[in-house]
Amino acid sequence: MRMIGLISVLWICVWGFIFSPRTQACTNILVTKGATRDGSVMVTYSCDGEWHPILRYTPAADYEPEDSLEITDWSGDVRGKIKQVEHTYAVIRQMNEHQLVIAESTFDGRPELQNPEGLLHYWDLMQLALQRAKTAREAIKVMTDLVADYGYRSTGESISIADPNEVWLLEIIGPGPGGKGAVWVAQRIPDGYVSCHANKARIGEFPLNDPENCWYSENVISLAVEKGYYDPASGEPFVFHEVYGPSTPRNLRWADTRVWSILRRVAPSANLKADYHRAVEGAEPYPLWVKPDEKLSLADVMELMRDHYEGTDFDMTKGIDAGPFGSPYRWRPLNWMVDSVEYAWERPVSTQQVGFTFVSQSRSWLPDPVGGVLWYGVDDSYTTCYVPLYCGINAVPESYAVGSIKQFTWDSAWWVFNFVANFATLKYSYMIEDIRAVQRRLEGDLIALQPAVDQTAAQLAKSNPDLMTRYLTDYSVTHGNLVVKRWRELAEYLMRK
Protein backbone atom coordinates (compact mmCIF):
# COMPACT_ATOMS: atom_id res chain seq x y z
CA MET A 1 0.00 0.00 0.00
CA ARG A 2 1.42 3.36 -1.03
CA MET A 3 0.86 6.62 0.86
CA ILE A 4 0.99 9.63 -1.43
CA GLY A 5 1.54 13.03 0.20
CA LEU A 6 -0.90 15.67 -0.98
CA ILE A 7 1.73 18.31 -0.35
CA SER A 8 3.71 17.00 -3.32
CA VAL A 9 0.66 16.58 -5.53
CA LEU A 10 -0.82 19.98 -4.82
CA TRP A 11 1.99 22.45 -5.39
CA ILE A 12 2.48 24.02 -1.97
CA CYS A 13 3.70 27.23 -3.58
CA VAL A 14 0.57 27.52 -5.71
CA TRP A 15 -1.49 28.21 -2.65
CA GLY A 16 1.12 30.32 -0.89
CA PHE A 17 -1.43 33.11 -0.43
CA ILE A 18 -2.66 31.26 2.65
CA PHE A 19 0.26 32.75 4.54
CA SER A 20 -1.07 36.28 4.11
CA PRO A 21 -4.39 37.94 5.00
CA ARG A 22 -6.96 37.16 2.33
CA THR A 23 -10.03 39.05 3.46
CA GLN A 24 -11.67 40.67 0.41
CA ALA A 25 -8.96 39.04 -1.65
CA CYS A 26 -10.18 37.50 -4.94
CA THR A 27 -12.40 38.25 -7.93
CA ASN A 28 -14.06 35.82 -10.40
CA ILE A 29 -16.08 36.37 -13.57
CA LEU A 30 -18.09 33.49 -15.05
CA VAL A 31 -18.98 33.73 -18.75
CA THR A 32 -21.18 31.12 -20.44
CA LYS A 33 -20.58 30.05 -24.03
CA GLY A 34 -23.74 31.81 -25.24
CA ALA A 35 -22.36 35.09 -23.88
CA THR A 36 -19.11 34.99 -25.88
CA ARG A 37 -18.47 35.83 -29.51
CA ASP A 38 -16.74 32.56 -30.34
CA GLY A 39 -18.64 30.18 -28.05
CA SER A 40 -15.87 29.84 -25.47
CA VAL A 41 -16.76 29.27 -21.85
CA MET A 42 -14.60 31.64 -19.80
CA VAL A 43 -13.73 32.03 -16.13
CA THR A 44 -11.49 34.74 -14.72
CA TYR A 45 -9.58 34.73 -11.46
CA SER A 46 -7.46 37.21 -9.59
CA CYS A 47 -5.74 35.48 -6.70
CA ASP A 48 -4.84 38.44 -4.54
CA GLY A 49 -2.37 38.47 -1.67
CA GLU A 50 1.20 39.30 -0.78
CA TRP A 51 2.88 36.21 -2.21
CA HIS A 52 5.00 34.90 -5.08
CA PRO A 53 3.27 32.16 -7.09
CA ILE A 54 5.10 29.20 -8.59
CA LEU A 55 3.49 27.76 -11.72
CA ARG A 56 3.50 23.97 -11.88
CA TYR A 57 2.42 21.25 -14.27
CA THR A 58 1.13 18.13 -12.49
CA PRO A 59 1.08 15.11 -14.83
CA ALA A 60 -1.63 12.48 -14.91
CA ALA A 61 -0.89 9.48 -12.71
CA ASP A 62 -2.09 5.95 -11.94
CA TYR A 63 -2.40 4.37 -8.51
CA GLU A 64 -3.17 1.04 -6.93
CA PRO A 65 -6.69 0.39 -5.58
CA GLU A 66 -5.45 0.33 -1.99
CA ASP A 67 -3.44 3.57 -2.20
CA SER A 68 -4.28 6.49 0.08
CA LEU A 69 -3.48 10.19 -0.05
CA GLU A 70 -2.12 12.21 2.85
CA ILE A 71 -3.67 15.62 3.50
CA THR A 72 -0.93 17.88 4.77
CA ASP A 73 -0.79 21.27 6.47
CA TRP A 74 1.51 24.01 5.13
CA SER A 75 3.91 23.12 7.91
CA GLY A 76 4.23 19.64 6.44
CA ASP A 77 2.34 17.98 9.29
CA VAL A 78 -0.07 15.27 8.16
CA ARG A 79 -3.65 16.26 9.00
CA GLY A 80 -5.22 13.03 7.80
CA LYS A 81 -5.62 10.82 4.76
CA ILE A 82 -8.24 9.93 2.18
CA LYS A 83 -8.64 7.12 -0.32
CA GLN A 84 -6.77 7.73 -3.57
CA VAL A 85 -8.45 7.14 -6.93
CA GLU A 86 -6.89 4.85 -9.51
CA HIS A 87 -6.24 7.62 -12.06
CA THR A 88 -5.72 11.37 -11.73
CA TYR A 89 -5.77 13.91 -14.56
CA ALA A 90 -3.03 16.31 -15.57
CA VAL A 91 -3.40 19.84 -14.17
CA ILE A 92 -1.85 23.22 -14.99
CA ARG A 93 -2.60 25.75 -12.25
CA GLN A 94 -6.41 25.49 -12.11
CA MET A 95 -7.29 23.83 -15.42
CA ASN A 96 -7.06 20.13 -16.13
CA GLU A 97 -6.52 18.15 -19.32
CA HIS A 98 -10.30 17.99 -19.97
CA GLN A 99 -10.69 21.80 -20.02
CA LEU A 100 -12.25 21.80 -16.55
CA VAL A 101 -11.37 24.99 -14.69
CA ILE A 102 -12.00 25.91 -11.05
CA ALA A 103 -11.52 29.27 -9.29
CA GLU A 104 -12.71 30.83 -6.03
CA SER A 105 -13.26 33.77 -3.74
CA THR A 106 -13.66 33.59 0.03
CA PHE A 107 -16.79 35.08 1.59
CA ASP A 108 -16.05 33.85 5.14
CA GLY A 109 -19.67 34.00 6.32
CA ARG A 110 -20.70 33.14 9.85
CA PRO A 111 -17.50 32.41 11.83
CA GLU A 112 -19.22 30.01 14.22
CA LEU A 113 -19.84 27.61 11.32
CA GLN A 114 -16.17 26.88 10.67
CA ASN A 115 -15.32 23.30 11.59
CA PRO A 116 -11.73 22.90 12.84
CA GLU A 117 -12.28 19.14 12.93
CA GLY A 118 -13.04 18.95 9.21
CA LEU A 119 -10.23 17.47 7.14
CA LEU A 120 -10.45 19.29 3.81
CA HIS A 121 -9.88 22.97 3.07
CA TYR A 122 -11.36 24.53 -0.06
CA TRP A 123 -8.01 24.43 -1.86
CA ASP A 124 -7.80 20.69 -1.20
CA LEU A 125 -11.26 20.26 -2.71
CA MET A 126 -10.45 22.33 -5.79
CA GLN A 127 -7.29 20.46 -6.60
CA LEU A 128 -8.78 17.05 -5.90
CA ALA A 129 -11.71 17.89 -8.19
CA LEU A 130 -9.35 18.94 -10.98
CA GLN A 131 -7.49 15.66 -10.62
CA ARG A 132 -10.64 13.51 -10.48
CA ALA A 133 -13.36 15.16 -12.61
CA LYS A 134 -13.91 15.76 -16.32
CA THR A 135 -16.95 18.06 -16.14
CA ALA A 136 -18.32 20.78 -13.89
CA ARG A 137 -21.08 18.49 -12.63
CA GLU A 138 -18.56 15.77 -11.82
CA ALA A 139 -16.40 18.32 -9.98
CA ILE A 140 -19.31 19.44 -7.79
CA LYS A 141 -20.05 15.82 -6.93
CA VAL A 142 -16.38 15.12 -6.13
CA MET A 143 -16.15 18.10 -3.78
CA THR A 144 -19.46 17.59 -2.02
CA ASP A 145 -18.90 13.84 -1.64
CA LEU A 146 -15.47 14.49 -0.14
CA VAL A 147 -16.78 16.91 2.48
CA ALA A 148 -19.59 14.49 3.30
CA ASP A 149 -17.00 11.78 3.98
CA TYR A 150 -14.20 13.83 5.54
CA GLY A 151 -15.57 17.20 6.65
CA TYR A 152 -15.04 20.79 5.48
CA ARG A 153 -12.43 22.89 7.31
CA SER A 154 -12.49 26.34 5.67
CA THR A 155 -14.78 29.35 6.06
CA GLY A 156 -17.39 30.28 3.46
CA GLU A 157 -16.29 29.94 -0.14
CA SER A 158 -17.66 30.78 -3.60
CA ILE A 159 -16.25 28.37 -6.18
CA SER A 160 -16.47 28.87 -9.97
CA ILE A 161 -16.54 25.61 -11.94
CA ALA A 162 -16.62 25.43 -15.74
CA ASP A 163 -16.18 22.95 -18.58
CA PRO A 164 -16.57 23.45 -22.35
CA ASN A 165 -20.36 23.50 -22.06
CA GLU A 166 -21.43 24.73 -18.63
CA VAL A 167 -20.58 27.14 -15.84
CA TRP A 168 -21.63 26.52 -12.24
CA LEU A 169 -21.26 28.46 -9.00
CA LEU A 170 -20.88 26.43 -5.80
CA GLU A 171 -21.15 28.23 -2.47
CA ILE A 172 -20.15 26.25 0.59
CA ILE A 173 -19.72 26.84 4.32
CA GLY A 174 -19.13 24.59 7.31
CA PRO A 175 -21.86 23.16 9.57
CA GLY A 176 -20.13 24.22 12.78
CA PRO A 177 -17.56 22.44 14.96
CA GLY A 178 -17.51 18.66 14.95
CA GLY A 179 -18.72 16.07 12.52
CA LYS A 180 -18.59 15.93 8.76
CA GLY A 181 -20.39 17.47 5.83
CA ALA A 182 -21.01 21.09 4.84
CA VAL A 183 -23.80 23.46 3.87
CA TRP A 184 -23.83 24.23 0.16
CA VAL A 185 -25.76 25.29 -2.93
CA ALA A 186 -24.64 24.93 -6.55
CA GLN A 187 -26.38 26.81 -9.36
CA ARG A 188 -25.80 26.60 -13.09
CA ILE A 189 -25.35 29.96 -14.78
CA PRO A 190 -27.92 30.07 -17.63
CA ASP A 191 -26.40 30.00 -21.09
CA GLY A 192 -26.05 33.46 -22.58
CA TYR A 193 -25.41 35.11 -19.21
CA VAL A 194 -22.47 36.40 -17.16
CA SER A 195 -22.00 36.13 -13.40
CA CYS A 196 -19.31 37.18 -10.94
CA HIS A 197 -18.35 37.06 -7.28
CA ALA A 198 -15.81 38.91 -5.17
CA ASN A 199 -15.55 37.77 -1.53
CA LYS A 200 -19.23 37.92 -0.69
CA ALA A 201 -21.78 35.12 -1.11
CA ARG A 202 -23.93 35.67 -4.21
CA ILE A 203 -26.56 32.92 -4.39
CA GLY A 204 -29.89 34.23 -3.13
CA GLU A 205 -33.20 32.42 -3.54
CA PHE A 206 -32.74 29.13 -5.39
CA PRO A 207 -35.11 26.50 -6.81
CA LEU A 208 -35.69 23.43 -4.65
CA ASN A 209 -37.08 21.28 -7.49
CA ASP A 210 -34.81 21.89 -10.48
CA PRO A 211 -32.04 19.25 -10.34
CA GLU A 212 -30.92 20.08 -13.86
CA ASN A 213 -29.84 23.55 -12.77
CA CYS A 214 -29.54 23.58 -8.98
CA TRP A 215 -28.15 21.19 -6.37
CA TYR A 216 -27.96 21.72 -2.63
CA SER A 217 -27.15 19.94 0.63
CA GLU A 218 -29.99 18.39 2.60
CA ASN A 219 -29.23 20.62 5.58
CA VAL A 220 -29.11 23.95 3.75
CA ILE A 221 -32.39 25.20 5.26
CA SER A 222 -32.70 22.97 8.32
CA LEU A 223 -29.34 24.04 9.77
CA ALA A 224 -30.29 27.71 9.35
CA VAL A 225 -33.54 27.07 11.22
CA GLU A 226 -31.72 25.13 13.94
CA LYS A 227 -29.17 27.93 14.42
CA GLY A 228 -31.79 30.66 14.43
CA TYR A 229 -30.60 32.26 11.18
CA TYR A 230 -33.94 31.74 9.46
CA ASP A 231 -37.54 31.43 10.61
CA PRO A 232 -39.83 29.74 8.07
CA ALA A 233 -42.84 31.21 9.89
CA SER A 234 -41.65 34.73 9.07
CA GLY A 235 -42.95 34.46 5.54
CA GLU A 236 -39.63 35.77 4.26
CA PRO A 237 -37.90 33.92 1.40
CA PHE A 238 -34.82 31.84 2.16
CA VAL A 239 -31.89 33.84 0.74
CA PHE A 240 -28.64 31.89 0.97
CA HIS A 241 -26.26 34.87 0.87
CA GLU A 242 -28.07 36.66 3.69
CA VAL A 243 -28.59 33.58 5.84
CA TYR A 244 -25.01 32.32 5.68
CA GLY A 245 -23.06 35.43 4.68
CA PRO A 246 -24.94 38.44 6.06
CA SER A 247 -24.29 41.84 4.48
CA THR A 248 -22.33 44.47 6.36
CA PRO A 249 -21.30 47.97 5.26
CA ARG A 250 -17.74 46.67 4.90
CA ASN A 251 -18.41 43.63 2.73
CA LEU A 252 -20.89 45.57 0.63
CA ARG A 253 -18.29 48.26 -0.04
CA TRP A 254 -15.28 46.02 -0.59
CA ALA A 255 -16.99 43.11 -2.35
CA ASP A 256 -20.21 44.21 -4.00
CA THR A 257 -18.68 47.37 -5.46
CA ARG A 258 -16.54 45.04 -7.57
CA VAL A 259 -19.61 42.98 -8.52
CA TRP A 260 -21.52 46.14 -9.45
CA SER A 261 -18.67 47.45 -11.57
CA ILE A 262 -18.26 44.21 -13.51
CA LEU A 263 -21.98 43.83 -14.17
CA ARG A 264 -22.45 47.50 -15.16
CA ARG A 265 -19.67 47.13 -17.75
CA VAL A 266 -21.12 43.88 -19.12
CA ALA A 267 -24.70 45.19 -19.27
CA PRO A 268 -24.88 49.01 -19.19
CA SER A 269 -28.55 48.78 -20.14
CA ALA A 270 -29.34 47.14 -16.78
CA ASN A 271 -28.67 50.55 -15.21
CA LEU A 272 -27.47 49.05 -11.95
CA LYS A 273 -27.28 51.63 -9.17
CA ALA A 274 -24.60 52.10 -6.56
CA ASP A 275 -27.14 52.12 -3.71
CA TYR A 276 -26.73 48.47 -2.72
CA HIS A 277 -22.95 48.50 -2.39
CA ARG A 278 -23.21 51.77 -0.48
CA ALA A 279 -25.54 50.02 2.03
CA VAL A 280 -28.54 52.24 1.27
CA GLU A 281 -31.49 50.85 3.21
CA GLY A 282 -33.98 49.02 1.02
CA ALA A 283 -31.64 48.76 -1.99
CA GLU A 284 -31.98 45.53 -3.97
CA PRO A 285 -29.02 43.12 -4.23
CA TYR A 286 -27.40 42.82 -7.64
CA PRO A 287 -28.63 39.96 -9.83
CA LEU A 288 -26.61 36.76 -9.77
CA TRP A 289 -26.26 36.99 -13.54
CA VAL A 290 -26.91 39.47 -16.36
CA LYS A 291 -27.25 39.14 -20.10
CA PRO A 292 -24.47 41.15 -21.77
CA ASP A 293 -25.54 43.97 -24.04
CA GLU A 294 -23.09 42.56 -26.58
CA LYS A 295 -21.37 39.19 -26.70
CA LEU A 296 -17.90 39.29 -25.21
CA SER A 297 -14.57 38.61 -26.88
CA LEU A 298 -11.53 37.22 -25.11
CA ALA A 299 -10.03 40.72 -25.07
CA ASP A 300 -13.26 42.10 -23.57
CA VAL A 301 -13.10 39.63 -20.70
CA MET A 302 -9.45 40.43 -20.06
CA GLU A 303 -10.41 44.10 -19.83
CA LEU A 304 -13.13 43.34 -17.28
CA MET A 305 -10.33 42.27 -14.95
CA ARG A 306 -8.74 45.72 -15.34
CA ASP A 307 -10.83 48.13 -13.34
CA HIS A 308 -10.30 50.89 -10.78
CA TYR A 309 -13.89 52.13 -11.24
CA GLU A 310 -12.71 54.55 -13.90
CA GLY A 311 -15.44 56.89 -15.11
CA THR A 312 -17.65 56.40 -12.04
CA ASP A 313 -18.15 58.33 -8.82
CA PHE A 314 -15.67 55.91 -7.24
CA ASP A 315 -12.88 56.42 -9.80
CA MET A 316 -9.66 55.73 -7.90
CA THR A 317 -7.52 57.69 -10.36
CA LYS A 318 -9.27 60.91 -9.30
CA GLY A 319 -9.26 63.02 -6.16
CA ILE A 320 -6.67 64.10 -3.65
CA ASP A 321 -5.98 60.52 -2.56
CA ALA A 322 -4.82 59.68 -6.12
CA GLY A 323 -1.99 62.18 -5.75
CA PRO A 324 -0.54 64.39 -8.49
CA PHE A 325 -0.20 61.50 -10.97
CA GLY A 326 -3.61 59.86 -10.62
CA SER A 327 -2.50 56.66 -8.92
CA PRO A 328 -5.32 54.16 -8.24
CA TYR A 329 -3.35 52.33 -5.56
CA ARG A 330 -4.37 52.53 -1.91
CA TRP A 331 -2.05 50.93 0.59
CA ARG A 332 -3.37 48.73 3.35
CA PRO A 333 -5.19 48.82 5.70
CA LEU A 334 -8.39 49.47 3.79
CA ASN A 335 -10.00 51.11 6.82
CA TRP A 336 -8.76 53.18 9.77
CA MET A 337 -10.03 55.36 12.61
CA VAL A 338 -9.51 59.10 13.17
CA ASP A 339 -11.16 60.78 16.16
CA SER A 340 -13.45 57.77 16.60
CA VAL A 341 -14.64 58.02 13.00
CA GLU A 342 -13.97 55.13 10.61
CA TYR A 343 -12.66 55.90 7.12
CA ALA A 344 -12.08 53.47 4.25
CA TRP A 345 -10.53 53.16 0.82
CA GLU A 346 -12.30 51.51 -2.08
CA ARG A 347 -11.23 47.99 -3.06
CA PRO A 348 -11.11 47.61 -6.87
CA VAL A 349 -10.92 44.57 -9.16
CA SER A 350 -7.32 45.49 -10.03
CA THR A 351 -5.13 45.77 -6.96
CA GLN A 352 -1.44 45.91 -6.15
CA GLN A 353 -1.12 42.81 -3.98
CA VAL A 354 -1.67 39.94 -6.43
CA GLY A 355 -0.09 36.54 -6.84
CA PHE A 356 -1.54 35.56 -10.21
CA THR A 357 -4.53 36.11 -12.43
CA PHE A 358 -6.00 34.23 -15.38
CA VAL A 359 -8.71 34.19 -18.01
CA SER A 360 -9.61 30.64 -19.05
CA GLN A 361 -11.12 29.41 -22.29
CA SER A 362 -12.89 26.05 -22.58
CA ARG A 363 -14.00 25.35 -26.17
CA SER A 364 -16.30 22.44 -27.01
CA TRP A 365 -15.55 22.31 -30.74
CA LEU A 366 -11.83 21.56 -30.31
CA PRO A 367 -10.00 18.53 -28.92
CA ASP A 368 -9.43 18.92 -25.19
CA PRO A 369 -5.65 19.54 -25.37
CA VAL A 370 -6.29 22.40 -27.81
CA GLY A 371 -9.62 23.73 -26.58
CA GLY A 372 -8.52 24.53 -23.06
CA VAL A 373 -6.36 27.63 -22.66
CA LEU A 374 -5.33 29.36 -19.46
CA TRP A 375 -4.39 32.94 -20.30
CA TYR A 376 -2.10 33.44 -17.35
CA GLY A 377 -0.61 36.55 -15.78
CA VAL A 378 1.25 37.42 -12.62
CA ASP A 379 1.00 40.42 -10.30
CA ASP A 380 -1.57 43.21 -10.83
CA SER A 381 -4.17 42.36 -13.48
CA TYR A 382 -4.09 45.96 -14.73
CA THR A 383 -0.39 45.87 -15.54
CA THR A 384 0.15 42.20 -16.35
CA CYS A 385 0.20 40.59 -19.78
CA TYR A 386 -1.85 37.42 -20.21
CA VAL A 387 0.01 34.58 -21.96
CA PRO A 388 -1.62 31.42 -23.39
CA LEU A 389 -0.98 28.10 -21.67
CA TYR A 390 -2.77 25.31 -23.52
CA CYS A 391 -4.07 22.53 -21.28
CA GLY A 392 -2.38 19.97 -23.53
CA ILE A 393 1.16 21.07 -22.62
CA ASN A 394 3.54 19.09 -20.42
CA ALA A 395 5.85 21.89 -19.23
CA VAL A 396 5.51 25.54 -18.25
CA PRO A 397 7.61 28.66 -19.02
CA GLU A 398 10.69 28.62 -16.79
CA SER A 399 10.30 32.23 -15.71
CA TYR A 400 6.90 31.48 -14.17
CA ALA A 401 8.21 28.46 -12.26
CA VAL A 402 11.04 30.07 -10.27
CA GLY A 403 11.55 32.68 -7.60
CA SER A 404 10.67 33.64 -4.05
CA ILE A 405 9.05 36.70 -2.54
CA LYS A 406 12.09 36.96 -0.25
CA GLN A 407 14.61 37.48 -3.07
CA PHE A 408 14.34 39.74 -6.12
CA THR A 409 15.50 38.22 -9.42
CA TRP A 410 15.02 39.17 -13.04
CA ASP A 411 14.64 35.44 -13.75
CA SER A 412 11.20 35.44 -12.10
CA ALA A 413 8.20 36.56 -14.14
CA TRP A 414 6.42 37.74 -11.00
CA TRP A 415 9.33 39.98 -9.97
CA VAL A 416 9.60 41.47 -13.46
CA PHE A 417 5.90 42.37 -13.58
CA ASN A 418 5.93 43.49 -9.95
CA PHE A 419 8.87 45.80 -10.61
CA VAL A 420 7.13 47.48 -13.55
CA ALA A 421 3.90 47.93 -11.59
CA ASN A 422 5.71 49.36 -8.56
CA PHE A 423 7.96 51.64 -10.61
CA ALA A 424 4.89 53.06 -12.38
CA THR A 425 3.61 54.50 -9.09
CA LEU A 426 6.32 57.20 -9.32
CA LYS A 427 4.52 58.91 -12.22
CA TYR A 428 1.51 56.71 -12.80
CA SER A 429 -0.44 58.85 -15.26
CA TYR A 430 2.58 58.95 -17.58
CA MET A 431 3.98 55.46 -17.19
CA ILE A 432 0.68 53.60 -17.39
CA GLU A 433 0.30 54.78 -20.98
CA ASP A 434 3.57 53.10 -21.96
CA ILE A 435 2.69 49.94 -20.02
CA ARG A 436 -0.76 49.63 -21.54
CA ALA A 437 0.59 50.20 -25.05
CA VAL A 438 3.00 47.27 -24.74
CA GLN A 439 0.35 45.16 -23.02
CA ARG A 440 -2.20 45.73 -25.79
CA ARG A 441 0.34 45.03 -28.52
CA LEU A 442 1.56 41.76 -26.98
CA GLU A 443 -1.88 40.44 -26.04
CA GLY A 444 -3.27 41.52 -29.40
CA ASP A 445 -0.54 39.62 -31.24
CA LEU A 446 -1.08 36.49 -29.14
CA ILE A 447 -4.84 36.59 -29.66
CA ALA A 448 -4.32 37.08 -33.40
CA LEU A 449 -2.04 34.03 -33.53
CA GLN A 450 -4.51 31.79 -31.72
CA PRO A 451 -6.64 30.61 -34.69
CA ALA A 452 -3.57 29.41 -36.59
CA VAL A 453 -2.16 27.67 -33.51
CA ASP A 454 -5.53 26.04 -32.84
CA GLN A 455 -5.85 24.80 -36.41
CA THR A 456 -2.35 23.34 -36.53
CA ALA A 457 -2.70 21.66 -33.14
CA ALA A 458 -6.15 20.25 -33.96
CA GLN A 459 -4.75 18.65 -37.12
CA LEU A 460 -1.83 17.21 -35.17
CA ALA A 461 -4.25 15.83 -32.57
CA LYS A 462 -5.61 13.55 -35.29
CA SER A 463 -2.35 12.58 -36.98
CA ASN A 464 0.34 12.76 -34.31
CA PRO A 465 -0.79 13.46 -30.72
CA ASP A 466 2.76 13.35 -29.35
CA LEU A 467 3.85 16.02 -31.82
CA MET A 468 0.79 18.06 -30.89
CA THR A 469 1.91 18.04 -27.25
CA ARG A 470 5.41 19.12 -28.25
CA TYR A 471 4.02 21.84 -30.51
CA LEU A 472 1.66 23.32 -27.91
CA THR A 473 4.29 23.10 -25.17
CA ASP A 474 6.89 24.83 -27.31
CA TYR A 475 4.41 27.54 -28.28
CA SER A 476 3.25 28.20 -24.72
CA VAL A 477 6.71 28.07 -23.15
CA THR A 478 8.40 30.16 -25.84
CA HIS A 479 5.82 32.93 -25.84
CA GLY A 480 5.56 32.98 -22.06
CA ASN A 481 9.28 33.54 -21.75
CA LEU A 482 9.31 36.07 -24.60
CA VAL A 483 6.64 38.15 -22.88
CA VAL A 484 8.71 38.24 -19.70
CA LYS A 485 11.78 39.25 -21.71
CA ARG A 486 9.80 42.06 -23.35
CA TRP A 487 8.50 43.18 -19.94
CA ARG A 488 12.04 43.43 -18.60
CA GLU A 489 12.89 45.62 -21.59
CA LEU A 490 9.86 47.73 -20.68
CA ALA A 491 11.18 48.06 -17.12
CA GLU A 492 14.53 49.29 -18.39
CA TYR A 493 12.81 51.70 -20.79
CA LEU A 494 10.70 53.21 -18.00
CA MET A 495 13.81 53.71 -15.85
CA ARG A 496 15.69 55.63 -18.50
CA LYS A 497 12.84 57.52 -20.18
Image (cartoon, grey):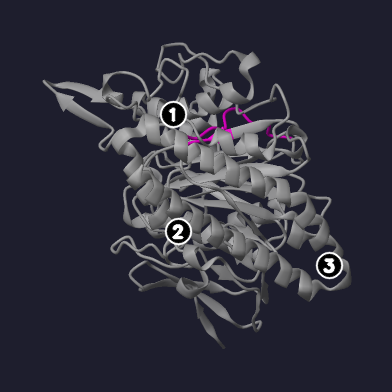
Task: Tell me the mark number nearer the camera, choosing from 2 and 1.
Answer: 2
Instruction: Say if the magenta span includes residue 40.
Output: no
Residue 365 visible in the displayed image = yes
- Tell me if residue 70 comes above or below residue 386 in the rendering: below
Labels 2 and 1 touching (C-beta < 8 A):
no
Asked which quadrant contains residue 28, the reply is: top right
Q: Which of marks 1 and 2 precedes in the sequence?
A: 1
Measured from the top left, where is residue 132 in percent x and y? 65, 65
Pick whichever, 379 or 22, lies toward us. 379
Instruction: Say if the magenta span includes residue 207.
Output: yes
State left or right for residue 440 relative to residue 433: right
* Farthest-out residue, left: 339
- Tell me if residue 450 comes above or below residue 310 in the rendering: below
Which secondary structure lies at badge 1?
Answer: loop
Which secondary structure lies at badge 3?
Answer: helix
Measured from the top left, where is residue 110 in percent x and y? 39, 39
**Residue at the location (63% across, 34% down)?**
300
Q: Which amino acid, mark 1?
A: His
Q: CA distance from mark 2 to mark 1?
A: 24 Å
Pick whichever, 155 or 294, lies toward us. 294
> Mark 1 sits on what residue?
308
The circle on residue 221 is none
Q: CA distance from mark 3 to mark 2?
A: 30 Å
> Mark 2 sits on what residue?
413
Question: Callout 3 environment at 10 Å: few (<14), some (14 to 19), or many (20+)?
Answer: some
Q: Which of marks 3 and 1 precedes in the sequence?
A: 1
Question: Callout 1 environment at 10 Å: few (<14), some (14 to 19), or many (20+)?
Answer: many
Q: Which residues are magenta?
A: 196-209
> Mark 3 sits on what residue?
460
Asked which quadrant contains residue 460, the reply is: bottom right
Measured from the top left, where is residue 433 in percent x and y? 46, 33
